[in-house]
Image (cartoon, rainbow, N blue to C red):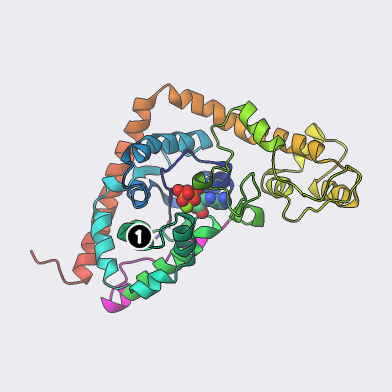
Amino acid sequence: MGKIILTGDRPTGRLHVGHYVGSLRRRVELQNSGEYSDIYIMIADSQALTDNADNPEKVRQNILEVALDYLSAGLDPEKSTIFIQSMVPELYEMTAYFMDIVTVSRLQRNPTVKSEIQMRNFEASIPVGFFTYPISQAADITAFKANVVPAGEDQMPMVEQTREIVHKFNTVYNTDTLVMPDILLPSNDACRRLPGTDGKAKMSKSLGNCIYLSDTEEDVKKKVMSMYTDPNHLKVSDPGQVEGNTVFTYLDAFCKDEYFAEFWPDYKNLDEVKEHYKRGGLGDVKVKKFLNRVLEEELRPIRERRKRWEQDIPAVYEILKSGSEKAERVAAQTLKEMRAAMKINYF
Ligand code: ATP
Ligand code: MG
């Protein structure tokens, strides 16, 4: 069987550069490599509803925003199946069967869910759907028999939990219906969990510390120039710290050597800039200006493609509709095989 990808995003806001380096950029590369027989990209609206039940309008609107971000970043509906999670109801039935083979204590141990519960102040009142979303994520991955999940570091516990579910299901029902997935993390550390512009652990839609793919040139510049750096690097002549310095983390994630010849010929590569900064004598403003040029280089084509797609919203919905129809056909087949393995295919 060929290699199959499943990955996706929650429609809780527009996509930001953390999504881009953590997963989206990789998806486009994999899509264009031609090495994958099927690529499924899911807009996880039901998952978004698990902590936004009272705000379905926000989720509905962001389905379109995320779809526009996908198409602008270079996902090609001819090569990748883009679909809406809730339009594939088979996923709910799969989730229900998986719930019978996962314990509450196993879910409680999931570190990403733990920190997300804290972040949302859910401690005393966690919606059941939110608590169990790793199980529904296992359904999303296995429904498409995906063996590769390109995602950021926060998704490691999810894929691990999916692997356990695959093993358990196949063992209990003596079948090979479900396929064991692997996470595909970005090769570069800075991309696995890009910090926010405030230097906080993770750039996240829910924390408001993002540079969005759809931000204007002016917005990006403003955000870069006010970014968190080394708080002890007060005078240009002071030696500076590169580790934990957000501007350098972003350069690690975005900078290519070829940008130096064009935008900053004083240096050949990022290592030379880092050395100078550490020695002292290189000011934050210069580094930030360079980062802004680099980001512009990456974001300009995305922004331009977005403008074109925004002129044809019906075409975007058509892509989501036909993608969802295809996804449902595939998930229905997997569900049929699961029910047969469980011997609950009565008629
Ligand atoms: P929310 O706050 O609603 O959970 P989010 O910003 O965390 O939103 P998700 O939709 O949960 O975004 O994540 C989508 C994908 O983007 C996942 O693969 C995740 O690993 C990746 N991702 C999200 N934020 C980052 C980041 N700061 N750095 C690297 N990857 C990220
Ligand atoms: Mg998230």
Q: Position of residue 109 (x, y in %)?
A: 44, 71
Q: Position of residue 192 (x, y in %)?
A: 59, 55
Q: Position of residue 206 (x, y in %)?
A: 49, 46
Q: Amino acid at mark 1?
A: Ser
- Which picture quadrant has residue 125? bottom left
Q: Nearer the viewer, residue 252 or 82?
A: 252
Outermost residue, top side: 311
Look at the image and give the residue range highlighted in magenta: 169-185
Seen at 39% across and 69% down, the residue is 107
Res. 76 in view: no
Seen at 36% across and 41% down, the residue is 59
Seen at 22% across and 71% down, the residue is 341
User: Vertically, is 145 above or below 70?
Assistant: below
Res. 123 in view: yes
- Which picture quadrant has residue 324? top left
Q: Position of residue 331 (x, y in %)?
A: 28, 54
Q: Say whether residue 177 is magenta.
A: yes
